[in-house]
Amino acid sequence: MNSIKGEIKSIFYISIFISLIFNLHKVLRVFGETNVVLESPWNFNLFELIFQILFQILFCYLIGYTALKRIQNNLSNNFFEIKIILAFIVTTFVFWFIGSNLQEIIFKNVSNQKFFYRTYLIRFILSSILMFVTSKILILNRQKNLGELENEKLKSSYLNSKLENLKDQINPHFLFNSFANLSALINEDQHKAKKYLSNLSDVFRYTLNNSNEQIVDLIDELALLNSYIELYKIRVQDGLSLQIDLPNKQKKILNMSLQPLMENVIKHNEISKEKPLSICLKKKGDLLIFENNLNPKNMSVNSNGIGLSNLNERYKILVGKEINIQKSETHFIVTLPLI
């Protein structure tokens, strides 16, 4: 709707522009600039000039507006397009006949009728052609914009669908790991199992409350990370520590982006009082650095790569950037772009 209003406004402005251009030499003549214009075989007065300009503006606007509507309705049909052109030719001659005769009757200022009617007709033919071409360009521009908008909608729909699939991968993965840990705790200590279940409900409450959000405040994700670590502290007690060195937390980050990093740490490392695991979060420019020391498990761990690859894919879609992963003999570092 806004684009159509803009096109109609463009038709009006172009009508004024064309009328002024075709009558520019008469405007200059009326205001005494006779040295820069051709001589006319009749003398224009100001009121006659205003009548001629306004009548031509009306003609241009009606031609342009009608062309805009007719071309839009019959753009793909050449037969109808020919009919439109013929209709505009007839309309041009009708307006030329009415306008020129009215002007002559009202102002009685024509000394050379042949020249007067001929130049009048030329102006209206050229104006009609220009307005027809203008309308065609506006329609083609609208089609181009609609095509681009449609492509953006399709792209957005595809990306949203892909993100939903990625989120559907995360939730069962997290749920499976949580239940596995809970099952182990039940066999070890039922009191700890109840406390673990309570913390687990807090984590899931956060995920449900923010299920429709793709980008969240960093401070909220840090709070979730703290809750998440509390789940594992119930099992490993003093074997796990978290240090957060972030003076400025007024940034945003992808929803559930720290949780898969934490899962990855737990999955691949031994955590105990004898082999403590330390996690450090710090900020460098617009990057969040998640770093942990390595205590690799002796037995091999099956990994489907869902966590980090999923997170990287979400970053590429939403932010246009990728996460950076570095591994040394002693430390594992993941760098996340902040938003």
Image: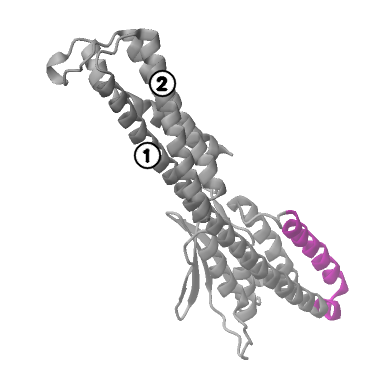
Q: Nearer the viewer, residue 297 or 207?
A: 207
| Residue 295 image point, x, y percent | 57, 80
Q: Which residue is mark 2?
A: 99
Disc 2 versus disc 1: nearer the observer? 2
Q: Nearer the viewer, residue 116 or 289?
A: 116
- The residue located at (64%, 87%) in the rendering is 302
User: Total of numbered circles in the picture?
Assistant: 2
Q: Left or right: where does residue 49 sit relative to residue 201?
A: left
Please state, as top left, top right, bottom left or bottom right, where the N terminus lies in the image: top right
Q: Residue furthest left?
A: 35
Query: Which of the 4 image quadrants contains residue 221?
Result: bottom right
Query: Which of the 4 image quadrants contains residue 313?
Result: bottom right
Q: Which of the marked residues, 2 or 1, is nearer the chain's N terminus?
A: 2
| Residue 309 image point, x, y percent | 56, 74
Q: Secondary structure at mark 1?
A: helix
| Residue 220 image point, x, y percent | 64, 52
- The residue located at (50%, 74%) in the rendering is 332
| Type of the residue with mark 2 | Gly
Q: Is residue 137 above or below residue 253?
A: above
Residue 31 is a magenta residue: no
Q: Which residues are magenta?
A: 185-209
Q: Secondary structure at mark 2?
A: helix
Q: Residue furthest bottom?
A: 299
